[in-house]
Amino acid sequence: MSSNSTRRKKSNRADGYVGILAADIHFPENGSLKDKRQFLRSLKARMARQLGASVAETGYHDLWQRSRLVVSVCSPSFPEINRALDRAERLIESRGLDLAGVDREIIKVPGSG
């Protein structure tokens, strides 16, 4: 492959986006750390499966009724990122959890070329 064709392919790459959702969650009915961890494991797996998201518990590890989850998704499409973050928020709410706070950020990653 010539260097011209390599440069052409790089310049045609689209910009990408990374969406981040940080959610403080309250588990009003939860009674133990074991229950919280089991519930979060299920929720994180569901988000990964349905959204292709990476999910991490980043706060309140030792509290049995609180958690902070950070969800990240990547896409070349800004609207797709917004939809994925909306779906992530709805997944949390659909599980009967209280959202104590939600922060979102979408970062544009420039394409090469």
Image (cartoon, rainbow, N blue to C red):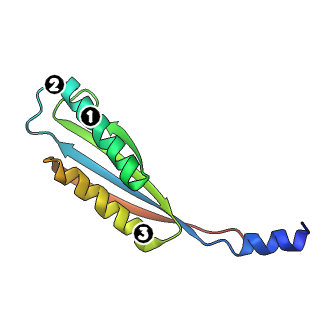
- Give the mark nearer the N terminus: 3 vs 1: 1
Dots 1 and 2: beta carbons under 8 Å? no
Instruction: Point out the residue furthest to the right here.
Output: 2
Q: Quadrant of the C terminus?
A: bottom right
**Mark 1: which amino acid?**
Tyr
Dots 3 and 1: beta carbons under 8 Å? no
Q: Name the spot of residue 102 as percent of width and height, x first.
A: 26, 56
Front: mark 2 or 3 = 3
**Mark 2: which amino acid?**
Ser
Q: Residue 34: which quarter of the image?
A: top left
The label shown at residue 80 is 3
Dots 2 and 3: beta carbons under 8 Å? no
- Give the mark nearer the N terminus: 2 vs 3: 2
Q: Name the spot of residue 71 as percent of width and height, x first.
A: 38, 50
Q: Residue 104: which quarter of the image?
A: bottom left
The label shown at residue 60 is 1
Secondary structure of the residue carrying tag 1 is: loop
Q: Name the spot of residue 29 as percent of width and height, x first.
A: 8, 36
Please state if 56 lies on the left or on the right of 96 as rendered.
right
Q: CA distance from mark 1 to mark 2?
A: 13 Å
- Give the mark nearer the N terminus: 1 vs 2: 2
The tally of labels here is 3
Residue marked by disc 2 = 32
The label shown at residue 79 is none
Q: Residue at x 76, y 71 (%)?
A: 9
**Mark 3: which amino acid?**
Glu
Q: Is residue 53 above or below residue 61?
A: below
Q: Quadrant of the N terminus?
A: bottom right
Front: mark 1 or 2 = 2
In the foreground, 112 or 101: 112
Q: CA distance from mark 2 to mark 3?
A: 36 Å
Q: Residue at x 34, y 38 (%)?
A: 57
